[in-house]
Image: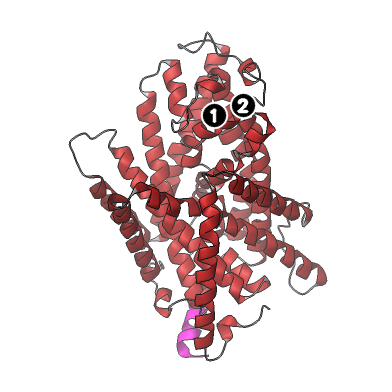
Amino acid sequence: MTSVQVDEQQHDTAEGGEGYHRALGARQIQMIAIGGAIGTGLFLGAGKAISKAGPSLILAYAIAGLVIFFIMRALGELLMYRPVAGSFSDYAREFLGPFWGYVTGWTYWLFWVVTGITEVTAAAQYMSYWTHDGFPQWAYALIFTVVLYAANLISVKLFGELEFWFSMVKVTAIVGMILICAGILTIGFSDAADTATVSNLWNDGGFFPKGIGGTLMTLQIVMFAFLAVELVGVTAGESKDPAKTLPKAINTVPWRIAVFYVGALIMILSVVPWHEFQPGVSPFVAAFEKMGLGVGAAIVNFVVLTAALSSCNSGMYSTGRMLRDLALNGQGPKFFTKLTKSGTPLIGTSFSAALMLVGVWINYVAPGKAFDYVVSFATISGMWAWIMILVCQIRYRAASDRGDVPKSPFRAPGAPYTSYFALAFIGMVIVMMGVDKDARVSLYCAPLWGLLLGVSYLVMKSRDPRGAAFGKAS
C-alpha cells in the first residue's frame, strides 16, 4: 500500500466515507428524503396522468408508493450493512461484480446529468412568468447552474441547507393545498364550493373512467414522479449519524407518499372533477383557478421553480460523488478522486456541471424533438438504480443468512419476497413503456447506452495491468 493510499484510508476513517466530511445532520437528511419524493412529476406531470386515468390515479400512486417503500427498505438494509457514498454502485460492485458496479455508477451519473439539464432549463423557463423584459433564457440557466455549482463546491453542509429550504417550500405548498381543499369541503368557501364533494371521486364515470388499462398506462408517469427518492442513499458517506438518521428517513416514506401524493390527489379531485384537468397544466394551478384564487398560479410557479432547482442541486451533488466512487475503484479517470479542503469532489462536480451547461446550450439551439429523446432516457436510467438496489439486497440477504457477511441491523420486512414483488412491478412498468408510443423512445436509448458501456468496460479492462478493478465479484 502506498503512502497516498494510507493517507486516504486514514482520512476515510477520521472524517467520513471515502474521505468525505460527515456534515449532514438529521434535519437535513429528513428533508432531503422528503424532497426526493416530491418533484415536478407531481406538480406538473400529474395533470397528464389525471386525464389518462381519472380518480384511479390515486390507486396507482398508492400501489407505486408501496413498491417505493420496498425499494427504500431494501436500500436501508444495505446502507446499515455498510454506509458508503457510492451506495448502490458500490453494492452492485460487491454483490454482482465489477461490471455491474461500472454500469450502475455511470448510468446513475448520466441520469442526473440529463435530469440536471432538463431541470435547469425548466427553471429558466419558469422565470419568464415574472420577467417580460426580454432577459434571455440562457442567462437564467447560466446563473442557476453557476450558483448551485458554487454552493456544492463550498461545502456539503451548504448543499444540505439549500435542499432543506427547497424541500420546505414544496412541503408547505402541498400541505397548504390540502388544508384549503379540506376547508372547501367542510366549510364551503370559495367558488368551488358548489361542486366540491368527495363523490367526485366516483360520480363521473366511476373510479376507473378510462378502465384498468388507462390506469396501467399512467404507471410510467407515476414512477417518474418518484425518481430521486433513492438520493438519500448517496448521502450515507456524509451523514453525521447514518445508523440513526437514515433508517428514520427511510421509515417516513409511507406517510410521505400517503400525505403528499395520495392525500393531495384525493383532496384536489374531490374539489375539482377529474375531467376538468388538462395534460400539460399543473393540477395545482387548475385547482387554484377553480377556487377563484388568482394568486394560485404565481404560487405554484414559484413552487415548481424551487422543485426544478432542488432537482438540479441534487444532480450537482450526486454526479460528483458517483464519478469519484468510480475513480476510487479504478473504473473512471483518477483525477475525479480529488477533493477540496471542505471535502467536496471538485473535478467530478465541475465536469458534470460543464456538461449541464452544454446541455442547456443544446436545448437552446437544437430542435426540440431531438432533445426530448435525450430527456426520455431519464426514466429508464433512474429505474435501473432501483433494479440494482433490489437485486443487490436479494444477494446480500442470501449471503448474510449464510454467514458470509454481517447481518444488517435494519432488515427489510418481508424480504426477499417484497424485493421480488418490486422487481416484477418495475418489469410491468417497463412493458407499459414499450406499449406507449410516447415513452417507447427511452427503451430505444437504453440498449445504445448499454452497448457504449459494454465496449468502454472492455477497453478499460484490457488496459488494467492488474485487473484489480475488473476482477470477479467478491
Residue 271 location, quadrant:
top right
In the displayed structure, does residue 110 sit left or right of residue 212? left
Closer to the camera in the image, 46 or 166: 46
Q: Residue at x 78, y 54 (%)?
A: 417
Type of secondary structure dominating the magenta stretch: helix
The disc labelled 1 sits on which kind of residue?
Answer: Ser
- The residue indicated by pointer 1 is 51
Closer to the camera in the image, 451 or 219: 451
Q: Residue at x 77, y 55 (%)?
A: 415
Residue 329 on image: x %, y %: 53, 78
Q: Residues within 10 Å of mark 2 (few under 14, many from 20)?
A: many
Residue 336 on image: x %, y %: 41, 74
Residue 470 location, quadrant:
bottom right
Which secondary structure, mark 1?
Answer: helix
The magenta segment: 1-11
Q: Residue at x 47, y 63 (%)?
A: 109
Residue 246 on image: x %, y %: 60, 55
Would you place residue 223 above or below residue 183 in this image? below
In the displayed structure, does residue 418 sit left or right of residue 21? right
Would you place residue 245 above or below residue 187 in this image? below
Q: Is residue 4 magenta?
A: yes
Instruction: Evaluate whether residue 162 shows in this view.
Output: no
Nearest to the eye among marks 1 and 2: give it: 1
- The residue indicated by pointer 2 is 55
Residue at the right extreme? 402
Q: Is residue 416 magenta?
A: no
Would you place residue 323 above or below residue 115 in this image? below
The disc labelled 2 sits on which kind of residue?
Answer: Pro
Which secondary structure, mark 2?
Answer: helix
